[in-house]
Structure formats: structure tokens, C-alpha cells
Image (cartoon, rainbow, N blue to C red):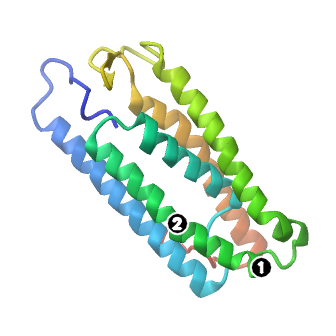
Amino acid sequence: MGYYNDVPPPGTPDWVMPTFAGIMSASVGLWLMAYVLMARRSLASNATPTPLIILGLNLAWEAVFAFYVADGPLDRIGFACWFLVDVPLVWATLRTIPKSFESQPLVRRHANAILFLSFLAGLAAFGWYAVWWLERPGMGYGDKTGKGWKDLTDRDTTELSFWTAVPIQLGGSIGSVAMVLQRGHSGGHGYAIW
């Protein structure tokens, strides 16, 4: 985020922006590996890999960022890959719901609806927030000089991604720990993947 239309402040060394792009590319790759490993571990342990609501929200976040917010090829490819690699994660989740929620029949019966409704709610919320954030110059904290989005100036997509991703990541972390405590095992993911 923020590589294609951002202009670094005067005096910024030439290596900063390529390093930023390299770090972002590495993070995309590491997340892709984590998604694949979670799907494999989920199917092997017959346990859902991530909390249902968080998975739905994460799918929505990636869709909004891949198809609306991303403003350069690296961003679009990264978010689109995340979104596509979510397919095996969702498939693993749907396959393992019956076993994972044996002790929670209400959740087991409505798991597909929970996942779908959380995805729709996330699309609406993240879509609205992204439009609201990006339609006004200078949104967020600090000076936005040099930050841009598509043909507009003073738009900070990096900060937008931070404020929208942190709640999902925090919820995912808390939910994953809660799943480990409730289940008594780390099936579905694992400490090595985290």
C-alpha cells in the first residue's frame, strides 16, 4: 500500500521505497504461506482454522482492498492472491465445521450463515469506511503531503489499511487463543504457523 502514488519527503534515501515494496511483498508471501498451512492443518486435524466471524470479515477486507483500494499492480496482485488463497481456507473451514462444532449444535447448524453474514457485514462496513476515508483529502493522523491514491492527492491508503486491519487481526488473535482454550488443542492452525 502506498508505493505507487506516494512521494517520499525530500531527502529520503533512494533505497527506502524499494525496501518498503520488498517488505510488503515478503509480507504478502508469508501471509499466503500461512493461509495454505492453515488450510492443510485444518483438514489434517479436522478443526476449523480460524474463528468464523473473523474469516468472513477477513474475506471482506481483502475483497474491498483488492477491488477498490489497491492502486498499483503489486497491491492488486497481493490482495487478489490473498483473496484467492482464502478459497482453500474457506473450503477447509466448511469441511471441518461438523467436527469442530460438535459440542455447539446451534453454531454448527448456522455456521454457513454466520460466515456469509459476517462477509456481507464486512463488505458493507469496510466498503463504506474506505469510500469515506478516500473521498476527503487529509484523513487520518499527520501530514498527508506526498500520499496519494489513484489520481487524488493527500490520501493515505497505508493508514487506512492499518485502521481497518487491526480490529480483524486483534479479533483473530483473541478468537484463535479462545479456540485453543475451548478445544484443548491447536488443531486448525498451530504455533508454528502463528
Asked if residue 121 shows in the view, the reply is yes
Q: Which residue is mark 2?
A: 87
Nearer the observer, 115 or 104: 115
Q: Which residue is mark 1?
A: 98
Q: Amino acid at mark 1?
A: Pro
The relative height of residue 163 versus residue 119 in the rendered view (above or below) is above
Q: Which SS class for mark 2?
A: helix
Residue 13 position, x and y percent, is 11, 30
Q: Residue at x 24, y 41 (%)?
A: 20
Residue 78 position, x and y percent, is 35, 52
Residue 37 position, x and y percent, is 47, 74
The mark tally for this picture is 2
Disc 1, disc 2: CB below 8 Å?
no
Asked if residue 48 shows in the view, the reply is no
Q: Residue at x 26, y 26 (%)?
A: 6
Q: Residue at x 21, y 24 (%)?
A: 8
Q: Label 1 vs label 2: CA separation? A: 19 Å
Q: Is residue 14 left or right of residue 138?
A: left
Q: Amino acid at mark 2?
A: Val
Q: Which SS class for mark 1?
A: helix
Q: Which image quarter holds the N terminus? A: top left
Crowding near pointer 2: few (<14 within 10 Å), some, many (20+)? Answer: some
Question: Most extreme residue toward the bottom, as rendered?
Answer: 44
Residue 109 position, x and y percent, is 85, 69
Looking at the rendered image, the disc whose residue lies closer to the viewer, 1 or 2, is 2
Nearer the observer, 8 or 124: 124
Determine the image quadrant of residue 67.
top left
Determine the image quadrant of residue 33.
bottom left
The relative height of residue 172 versus residue 66 in the rendered view (above or below) is below
Nearer the observer, 5 or 37: 5
- Sequence-wise, which precedes: disc 1 or disc 2? 2
Crowding near pointer 1: few (<14 within 10 Å), some, many (20+)? Answer: some
